[in-house]
Amino acid sequence: MEKESRKVREFRRREQEILDTALQLFLERGEDSVTVEMIADAVGIGKGTIYKHFKSKTEIYLRLMLDYERELNQLFHSDSVAKDKDALSRAYFAFRMGDPERYRLFDRLEERIVKGNQAPEMVEQLHSIRASNFERLTRLIEDRINEGKLEDVPPYFHYCAAWALVHGAVALYHSPFWNTVLEDQEGFFQFLMDLGVRMGNRRRREDMGKEPLK
């Protein structure tokens, strides 16, 4: 029994090593340039061993994407967010914008996989996790609306606005022109996160009554 357990642990360790190595190669060389053979060589195993864990490169893509969404799911259910709902926005932006290369890779891969109707069961699993994240976010946003901290609009307005800010920030990060303009990328992303945290906050009544500056 102990031997079998050790075998399972080794299987999972190698699987994670394959995933970590594949992600690094996808980010460095582009997913289209990376073959299963290249991943196997980088890990130091045979190509056949890869197929004991994953049926195809598409399954590797989706497993990376599933793990990414699970990370966010764990974040939304963490004690820190449960105890301090104000920490939710910052945690979300930090997670999404903390690794713009990975975010852009997964966004690009998902569009391709869905359009090609590849691995539909894994795609359904991915969307199920994302739906769970959305439900969790909706409850947390509704609580903040009821507490008078956020504007009283449909919760998905807040969530979609956050997504749009992150998506735009990542596009800006990868733009050949704007990339040269952003001399302080880290400072800019921090500035955007600060904006995102305040975005959607309910304005005080005295502020709402003021005339806009001309």
Image: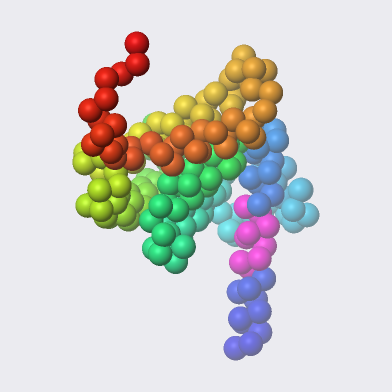
184 and 67: which is toward the camera = 184
Q: Is residue 17 covered in magenta? A: yes
Would you place residue 75 above or below residue 99 in this image?
below
Residue at 63 percent across and 73 percent down: it is: 9
Task: Judge left or right: residue 10 versus residue 90.
Answer: right
Q: Quadrant of the N terminus?
A: bottom right
Q: Quadrant of the C terminus?
A: top left
Residue at 39 percent across and 46 percent down: it is: 123
Would you place residue 108 above or below residue 4 in this image?
above
- Main secondary structure found in the magenta portion: helix
* Place of residue 77 in the rendered image (x, y in percent of width and height, measured from the top left): 41, 62
Q: Quadrant of residue 4?
A: bottom right
The scheme the figure's colours follow is: rainbow
Q: Quadrant of residue 51?
A: bottom right
* Place of residue 138 in the rendered image (x, y in percent of width and height, measured from the top left): 28, 50
Q: Is residue 196 covered in magenta? A: no
Q: Is residue 177 visible?
A: yes
16 and 169: which is toward the camera = 169
Residue at 69 percent across and 49 percent down: it is: 21
Task: Judge left or right: residue 64 versus residue 186.
Answer: left
* Place of residue 34 in the rendered image (x, y in percent of width and height, measured from the top left): 67, 37
Instruction: In the displayed orientation, state which residue is furthest to the bottom.
Output: 1
Instruction: Please provide the residue range marked out in magenta.
Output: 11-19
Would you place residue 152 above or below residue 69 in this image?
above
